[in-house]
Amino acid sequence: MALVPAGEAFTPRQRESIDRAIRQAMQQTDLRFSVFVGALEGDARVRAEALLAGLGDDAPRAVLIAVDPAARALEIVTGTLAKRLLDDYACGLGALAMTTQFAAGDLAGGIVSGLRTLGEHARSPRVLHVEQS
């Protein structure tokens, strides 16, 4: 679920919070959510897209959040099917939720907030009732 490199900066409790937020977003949306925290060497967007492609068969239904704390870089990339549920506006809201908490020094909390925001915006609308002829 989460792609966090060795030497991570999260406590076990923070890691569990992120994993729980990933699971919840996946249950809400039927999309695959992944998080990468580490150095995004070179062009951050290109690297995030390569990480998304690395998810193989899951890539079209995937949402990847890539965070490079040292470079202060954040990328949210979506697969072709996921993009139908998460447009640029929704991803922008997710990024805003994250960067607000990042600015306060809360990396894990920012990731959790971003996942929740993305999960809420990607959720398929419920059908309340259907008229039958």
Image (cartoon, rainbow, N blue to C red):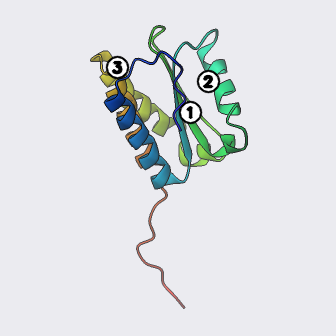
Q: Amino acid at mark 2?
A: Ala
As drawn, is 105 to the left or to the right of 118?
Answer: left
As drawn, is 86 to the left or to the right of 21?
Answer: right
Task: Identify the mark nearer the N-term, 1 or 2.
Answer: 2
Q: CA distance from mark 3 to mark 1?
A: 18 Å
Which residue sits at x=65%, y=47%? 81
Is residue 80 at least partly visible in the picture?
Answer: no
Q: Is residue 47 above or below residue 31?
A: above
Residue 9: percent from the left, percent from the top? 40, 17
Q: Are marks 1 and 2 in contact (CB under 8 Å)?
A: yes
Q: Amino acid at mark 3?
A: Phe
Q: CA distance from mark 1 to mark 2?
A: 7 Å
Which residue sits at x=70%, y=32%? 53
- SS at mark 2 in the image: helix
Mark 1 lies on residue: 64
Which residue sits at x=63%, y=12%? 43
Residue 37: percent from the left, percent from the top? 49, 21
Question: 110 or 7: which is nearer to us?
Answer: 7
Report which quarter residue 46 is drawn in. Answer: top right
Circle 1 residues within 10 Å: few <14, some 14–19, many ≥20: many
- SS at mark 3 in the image: helix
Q: Is residue 131 above or below residue 73?
A: below
Mark 3 lies on residue: 102
Report which quarter residue 133 is drawn in. Answer: bottom right
Which residue sits at x=53%, y=43%? 86
As drawn, is 86 to the left or to the right of 49?
Answer: left
Which mark identifies residue 48? Answer: 2
Q: Amino acid at mark 1?
A: Leu
Task: Identify the mark nearer the N-term, 3 or 1.
Answer: 1
- SS at mark 1 in the image: strand
Query: How many marks overall?
Result: 3
